Image: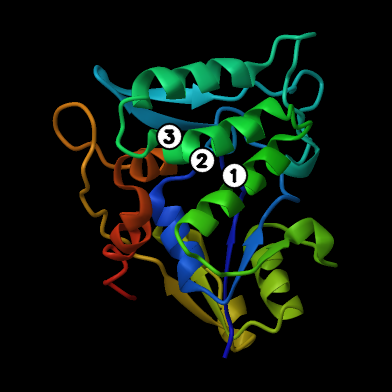
Amino acid sequence: MKSVAIMQPTFLPWIGYFALIDRVDEFIFLDNVQFDKRSWQQRNKIKTANGDIWLSVAVSTKGKRDQIIKQTEILYEGDKSPLDKIEKSIEFNYSKAPFYEHYASDVFSFLRNRPKYISDLNQDLIKWACEKLNIKTPFIKASDLDVKGEKEILLLDICQVLSATSYVSPPGSKTYLAETDAFNKAKIDVMYHEYIHPEYTQLYHDFLPYMCILDLLFNEGPASGDIMRQGMIKRS
């Protein structure tokens, strides 16, 4: 028996993304599909004294309408980096968090390395966060596999190439996965990752869910992995 999950490499994902990684035997970065401008692939949220705000990574898209995630470059303008603004926003809003000093230098080192591709930055940050959450799941890039097709056919092809017996999907994919019997014919079980967002200690006022993973790490530190797993109760 072997379970896999397949997701686009997003920028500093929320904790449910990491719970999905923790749930499966292998996690596949879906980096060989079209880049979606203004999506989670290049932005996420942090909490501030005035509510949540977006951290957005500028990328090069002009004349590159059909580029895939793997090919999408971060937009640098000479010495100016869009990642500098992100670093300043993180520092301004989290410098007083209990565990800020434990993690900030690691995060900033990824940003200061001036990575060329957004996918590489995202994957490096996700793998780093997994280490801090004590997640041991191995990673695979879809672009490294001999797979083809679109939507559910591509997902099925990945599962078959990896000899998976079950595919764990975010619940948002239920609608279009329910319209195909391809997984059933291939004898691959489809399960949905229902996640109950746990509450934890935050800076500023009432609790806000669905912040990026840094919000949990900066506020809860070594307890973050256990807190993440509190939401992994419901199964379907």
Dot 1 or dot 2: first in sequence order is: 2
Dot 3 or dot 2: first in sequence order is: 2
Q: Is residue 161 above or below residue 171?
A: below
Give the residue displayed 24% in from the left and 19% down from the top: 49
Q: Amino acid at mark 3?
A: Glu
Asked if marks 1 and 2 touch (Cβ < 8 Å), the reply is: yes
Q: Residue 86: x and y, percent?
A: 53, 21
Q: Measure how far apart labels 1 and 3 are at the Cα level.
A: 17 Å
Give the residue displayed 50% in from the left and 60% down from the top: 176
**Is 69 situated left or right of 22 in this image?**
right
**Is 50 situated left or right of 54 in this image?**
left
Q: Amino acid at mark 1?
A: Leu
On the question of residue 178 being in view, the answer is no
User: For this rendering, which residue is in front, 117 or 125?
Assistant: 125
Name the residue tied to disc 2. Answer: 12
Label 2 residue SS: loop
Q: Amino acid at mark 2?
A: Leu
Dot 1 or dot 3: first in sequence order is: 3
| Residue extending farthest front | 101
* Badge 3: residue crowd in 10 Å (few <14, some 14–19, many ≥20): few
Name the residue tied to disc 3. Answer: 101
Label 3 residue SS: helix
Q: Residue 7: x and y, percent?
A: 58, 56
Name the residue tied to disc 1. Answer: 125
Give the residue displayed 74% in from the left and 59% down from the top: 141
